[in-house]
Image: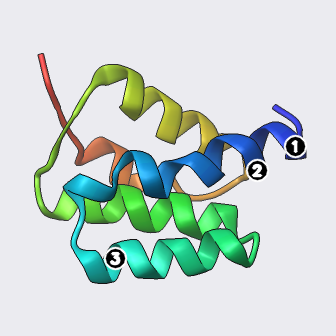
Amino acid sequence: MDDNEIARRASSLPQRFADRIPARTREIIELMESGGEYGELTIELAASLAARHVPVTAAERDELLGLLEAMGMPTDPIERLNVEG
């Protein structure tokens, strides 16, 4: 995954998960997105979803994991996600 693909995928996350995270968290990750802080955005989103036990699909989990791995970010929150099915 190259930098452009990382940016494209990570930029879509705030909108896609907007209805499953608190408004304040959404504001924070939107600021991270506008600043190009895609690694921080992805880990903050994953941590928020995990902390609140928000259901995610296996595909969403895999996407978050793939982004974190591609950016060399910690993947700890992924293990705590509430994966449906």
Label 1 to label 2: alpha-carbon separation:
5 Å
Quarter of the image with the C terminus in it: top left
Residue on which the image places disc 2: 7
Q: Position of residue 66 (x, y in %)?
A: 59, 34
Disc 1 is placed on an element classified as helix
**Vertical relation: 64 (above or below) 44:** above
Name the amino acid type tagged 3: Thr
Name the amino acid type tagged 2: Ala
In this rendering, does residue 72 appear at all?
yes
The 10 Å Cα crowd at callout 3, few under 14, some 14 to 19, many 20 or more, is some
Ranked by sequence position, the earlier of labels 3 and 2 is: 2
**Contact between labelled residues 2 and 1, with CB atoms less than 8 Å apart:** yes
2 to the left or right of 59: right
Name the amino acid type tagged 1: Asn
Q: Position of residue 46 (x, y in %)?
A: 37, 55
In this rendering, does residue 68 appear at all?
no
State the image quarter where residue 23 is shown: bottom left
Residue 25: give its label: 3
Residue 4: give its label: 1
